Image (tube, rainbow, N blue to C red):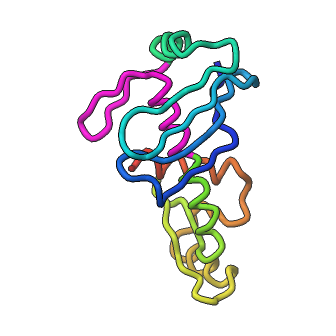
């Protein structure tokens, strides 16, 4: 089962205790749910529009996804944790894309680093970083898979 979020709208200003968002949940290439959270705490709301029910998706996730530990808390896999994980990845992806405009971003020794350009050409900053660490993976100008790898690293640390 491939679960993905599309048409995501997120509001940092409205997010108080939880993330304020709306999104469409697609399962195996078909629209399954409309999701939303008002950001005031509490769970997400799902409106079923496809053939999958929330309980069917939860049963599949419980069987096929591992239990997650975050800050000492155990999270059973369910649709809400899956949506939260997908939303965190998408928000981090958007943040990283914005960061690329003003910073050189690299993956070095399994960590993501940023080097402010401060009106310097990207090539000069890149040469300086490569001179000190030839194994650095440059995110700027790389394909989307490298950017997604950086997002995975950043979300895993959070």
Along the viewing direction, whichever of 34 and 118 lies nearer the viewer? 34
In the displayed structure, does residue 17 sit left or right of residue 126? left
- Give the residue drawn at x 49%, y 60%: 112
- Residue found at the very far left of the displayed protein: 72
Q: Can residue 153 be seen in this view?
A: yes
- Residue 26, horizontal then vertical, whole percent: 68, 27
Residue 51's place in the image compared with 74, above or below, is above
> Residue 137: which quarter of the image?
bottom right
Q: Can residue 135 be seen in this view?
A: no
- Residue 101, horizontal then vertical, whole percent: 66, 73
Along the viewing direction, whichever of 10 and 85 lies nearer the viewer? 10
- Residue 8, horizontal then vertical, whole percent: 64, 45
- Residue 96, horizontal then vertical, whole percent: 58, 61
- Give the residue drawn at x 57%, y 33%: 35
Residue 142's place in the image compared with 1, above or below, is below
- Residue found at the very far bottom of the displayed protein: 119
**Which quarter of the rendered picture does the N terminus lie within?**
top right
Along the viewing direction, whichever of 30 and 104 lies nearer the viewer? 30
Residue 79's place in the image compared with 103, above or below, is above
Which stretch appears magenta?
65-89
- Give the residue drawn at x 71%, y 51%: 144
- In the rendered structure, does residue 103 fall within the stretch colored magenta? no
- In the rendered structure, does residue 80 fall within the stretch colored magenta? yes
- Give the residue drawn at x 49%, y 66%: 113
């Amino acid at each position: 089962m491939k679960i993905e979020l599309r048409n995501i709208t997120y509001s940092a200003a409205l997010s108080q205790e939880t993330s304020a968002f709306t999104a469409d949940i697609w399962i195996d290439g078909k629209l399954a749910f409309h999701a939303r959270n008002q950001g005031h705490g509490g769970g997400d709301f799902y409106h079923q529009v496809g053939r999958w029910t929330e309980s069917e998706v939860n049963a599949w996730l419980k069987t096929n996804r591992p239990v997650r530990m975050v800050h000492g808390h155990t999270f059973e896999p369910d649709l809400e944790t899956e949506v939260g994980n997908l939303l965190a990845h998408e928000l981090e992806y958007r943040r990283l894309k914005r960061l690329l405009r003003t910073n050189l971003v690299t993956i070095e020794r399994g960590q993501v680093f940023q080097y402010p350009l401060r009106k310097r050409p990207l090539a000069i900053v890149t040469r300086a970083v490569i001179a000190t660490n030839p194994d650095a993976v440059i995110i700027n100008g790389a394909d989307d898979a490298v950017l997604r790898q950086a997002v995975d690293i950043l979300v895993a640390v959070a």
